Amino acid sequence: IKEFELANSELKRHADTLEIRAEALVSKSAALYEHVKYLAASDAAYLASIEKSDFANAHLARAKAYFPRSEFDKAIRSLNRVIQLIPNHAEAYSLRGQAYLAKNNPGQAIKDQDKSIELDGKYALAYSRRAEAYFSKKDKASTVKNIESALGLQPTLPDALCQRAYLQAMKKEYGRAL
């Protein structure tokens, strides 16, 4: 019994070390991403997911690193893994919706943004992303509604401010667009 307890405590210590290393690699991935080193960011996130395959943040970091390189299928696979591990992860649904929109699938993009908003009704970026999906479907009323919802939650959200300015410029309301 003592040998079993000793082996069990060693395994626990090893599991704790793996989690710490995985967290460090995710932090490294985020820092590399901020410095526009997307391939290195993706590699660090990949290593984190190898260290601890059920570490959702590693898969989320990988997905984010795939976006600037337009590797949307890989981003979707990583985000599917995040959602599998944490089914109520609003950011993962929203990012996956953005990837679907980049692949010219606005219907699926809207579904994912809907789910993200259902999970976190205060996630302004999901409203802005849903506005973008509606815009691609030429649904002006839904586009405007979602931009206003995003700005109602976060008045300085750059994405929504740019979207609103673009729509106002399209209507030749240049004074309001600026």
Image (tube, rainbow, N blue to C red):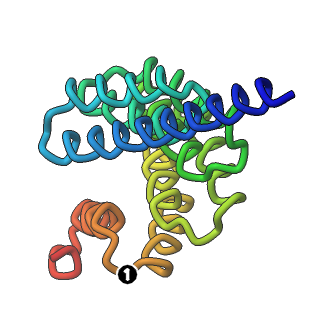
Farthest right residue?
1
Asked if residue 163 is positioned above or below residue 135 in the image, the reply reads below
Instruction: Locate residue 11, reporting x and y percent.
Output: 64, 29
Residue drawn 76% across the image and 24% down it: 3
- Assign the N terminus to one quadrant of the image: top right
Instruction: Locate residue 161, reporting x and y percent.
Output: 30, 70
Asked if residue 140 is positioned above or below residue 95 in the image, the reply reads below
Instruction: Locate residue 9, reporting x and y percent.
Output: 68, 36
Secondary structure of the residue carrying tag 1 is loop
Asked if residue 60 is positioned above or below residue 52 in the image, the reply reads below
Rendering quarter of residue 20:
top left
147 or 93: nearer the viewer: 93
99 or 12: nearer the viewer: 12
Residue bearing the label numbered 1: 155
Residue drawn 21% across the image and 68% down it: 172
- Assign the C terminus to one quadrant of the image: bottom left
Rendering quarter of residue 33:
top left
Q: Residues within 10 Å of mark 1 (few under 14, many from 20)?
A: few
Instruction: Locate residue 127, reporting x and y percent.
Output: 52, 61
Rendering quarter of residue 118:
bottom right
- Left or right of 164 on screen, residue 94: right
Amino acid type shown at disc 1: Pro
